[in-house]
Image: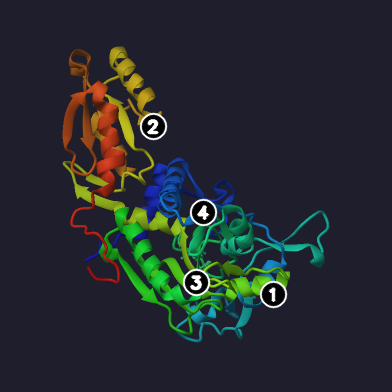
Amino acid sequence: MPIKVEMEKIVSLCRRRGFIFPSSEIYGGLSSCWDYGPLGVELKRNIRQAWWQAVVQERDDMVGLDASILMHPQTWVASGHLEGFADPLVECKSCHLRWRHDDLAGNNCPACGGELTEPHLFNLMFKTSMGPIEEEANVVYLRPETAQGIFVNFQNVLNTTRKRLPFGIAQIGKAFRNEITTGNFIFRSREFEQMEIEFFVKPETDKEWFNYWLEERLDWYVKLGIKKESLRLRQHTKRELAHYARECYDIDYLVPMGWAELEGIANRGDFDLVQHAKYSGKSLNYLDEETKEHIIPYIIEPSAGVDRSALAFLCDAYDEEPDKEEIRVLLHLHPTLAPIKVAVLPLSRREKLVAVAKKIYADLRQNWMVNYDDTQSIGRRYRRQDEIGTPFCVTIDFQSLEDKQATIRERDTMNQIRIPISELKTTLQAKLEGEALFVLPPGGKIWKGGGEE
Ligand code: GAP
């Protein structure tokens, strides 16, 4: 059975150890906005990097893009967001709380039981104005998805890279939605980060590529340590499908409040390129060199969230083990994702030990994010590193001064090995960047796709 951790434990750990803080906390916070602290920023950087490596760096058929957040307002007319990106909003006539009508089971306010107003459509895009004068003509929107930046650059990328179908464009960036109901920590916020692929294919090959990306994306989470039983694929019903989608599956993760969408994989057909060609008056055709025909490619879109991935990786990694006096809290984060890869811990603050430890610290940090800690007992220091998911601790003791050896202690097993200091870097490198990448979590298996092994 998947292990369910209470959300309060994750929130408390994130707060306590500096992963995630409420936004502008000294002013009382800002609803549904979050600030990533020193460890959170590393976790997010590692998630982005792992995604980029898998979908751009290691592939011939993908390139990257970084489009601006503010786009020409016509973009949102063409995309259908101005008209259709809206949720039905109702307000309680007694307590004035607002709800998404389609989230409610009954016809009364879930908080006080009061009568609700009739639903009206509420557009989720944040509006602002460009330039010093605030008037309707200057209205621009904060993008609600990064995808549109890719569609409007389709010809630019095609012309400059000479890519042929099938190929994809990947982008990571902020998106904004004025969500009616938020909550569950960073799961649903108003400012978040997406990792999106728009994969352009010949229309008749859409099904094949759609299935390919379902498998590929599931695999990514499993390879990075998420328990397979905590993931599932869920097909959208016809009623749920977004206005642009022909077919869509969610990759759901079992977050503390139940199954919830981590990533959406949609077949957008030719909807976006047709719409942008129509509204811009520019041709967004593709010349098929084999048939000499102009075609409009279909688009397969795997769209993931950095924040939701971070939450899933944290929940999945969280563990508690009985310890001598207390409970050992640890994060079994995959080494690729761990914010700190190695901690260097001299057994005492004696000058000679500190000198050796600091030299090792200076050397290792050229390769990875490394912590140096010489406060409190060694047991407490190990626990602190376990709690933030540091895979390895290097301990320097008095014997190290004699035999020039150090101890490497592994987080999950607490096993220790003693090796020459001169071999530390290569040993850690092999463990962090080589072997560890392919070591599955205990009981884990490689995902074969389609929900079955
Ligand atoms: N371009 C397609 C698109 O935007 P989506 O299902 O609306 O599709 C894709 O969003 C992903 O973006 C989601 O699976 C989720 O990971 C993330 N996401 C969407 N809304 C979010 C929110 N309010 N807070 C955090 N992440 C969000």
State the SS at label 3: loop
Q: Horizontally, is 128 left or right of 313 in the view?
A: right
Q: Which residue is mark 3?
A: 202
Compute the Cα span from label 1 to label 2.
Answer: 50 Å
Given this view, does label 1 or label 2 mark the residue nearer the observer? 1
- Ligand 1 within 8 Å of the CB at mark 2: no
- Give how far across and how far down residue 190 sits, in percent: 56, 61
- Give how far across and how far down residue 123 sits, in percent: 64, 73
Earlier residue among tags 4 and 1: 4
Label 3 packing within 10 angstroms: few (<14), some (14-19), many (20+): some
Can residue 123 be seen from the camera position used here?
no
Can residue 265 be seen from the camera position used here?
yes
Q: Which residue is mark 4?
A: 63
Which residue occupies 61% across, 71% down?
273
Which residue occupies 50% across, 64% down?
165
State the SS at label 1: helix
